Image: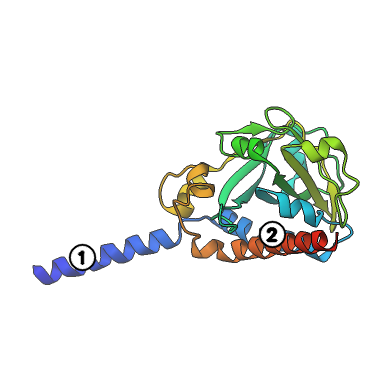
Amino acid sequence: MRKVSIVMSLVLLLTLSVGASSGLDKKDTKTLQEAVPVLNALASAPDKGIPQELLAKADCILIFPNVAKGAFIVGGKAGKGVASCRMPNGSMSAPAFYEIGGASVGFQIGGQTADVVLLIMNEGGVSHLLSDKFTLGGEATATAGPVGRTAQASTDAQMHAQILSWSRSQGLFLGAALDGSVVKPDKEANESLYGRPISGREILMDSKVTTPAQAQSLIKSITRHMDAAAAHERAEKSKG
């Protein structure tokens, strides 16, 4: 009987470990994977990408790969993405899943899908990110971000916005006005990734979790690009 009990315990442990390691569904796993090339595109197109000084100043970044244009227009769930925020020590937090959707008059770029990138620029924007949901251009002050090597030509509205937004279609980044789009945490995906119900604040701000193996490649990529942007800004300031 004791041998049977031991065998049953081992089987139970194996079952639990397999379940814990396969929590994310294919779509969420794909989102983590596809966010990496979106980030890489920021660095490979310095004259047509997001300005380095804005990456350096951003408190958080949200990346939504393959957002469906049609879903935006009809108000359905447009896409899934991931967010990471800068910690007090300068490192980037573990990722949190988010959803974006809803009507958006400004989302009129070509093609059926596009990548969407949001930069959270200040404390007010972070507060909205940590809420149950927020509307771009509604509760959260948001505007289309500038494109190019620097942000010197940015308008006053852009420089004081809580959130800046871009879209990428056919390889080009464009500032995108996503007014009316709703952004909210994907609670189900976050629970699958971390194995328990967990809030965006616990993931992004409170250091309650470590980065799971499935997401390490993404966070390393985010860290690399954010650190490179910060180094670029320090170099530019030293020239002045």
Q: Nearer the viewer, mark 2 or mark 1?
A: 2
Question: What residue is disc 1 on?
Answer: 8
Residue occupying the far left of the picture: 1
Residue occupying the far bottom of the picture: 3
Q: Position of residue 201 (x, y in %)?
A: 51, 43
Q: Kindly identify the residue that appears in the image at 59 percent across and 54 percent down.
A: 27
Q: Is residue 20 above or below residue 67?
A: below
Q: Is residue 119 above or below residue 12?
A: above
Q: Is residue 28 left or right of residue 236?
A: left
**SS for tag 2?**
helix
Quadrant in the rendering for residue 184: top right
- Name the amino acid, label 2: Met
Residue occupying the far top of the picture: 138
Circle 1 crowding by C-alpha within 10 Å: few under 14, some 14–19, many from 20:
few
Q: Is residue 129 left or right of residue 114?
A: left
**SS for tag 1?**
helix
- Name the amino acid, label 1: Met
Question: What residue is disc 2 on?
Answer: 226
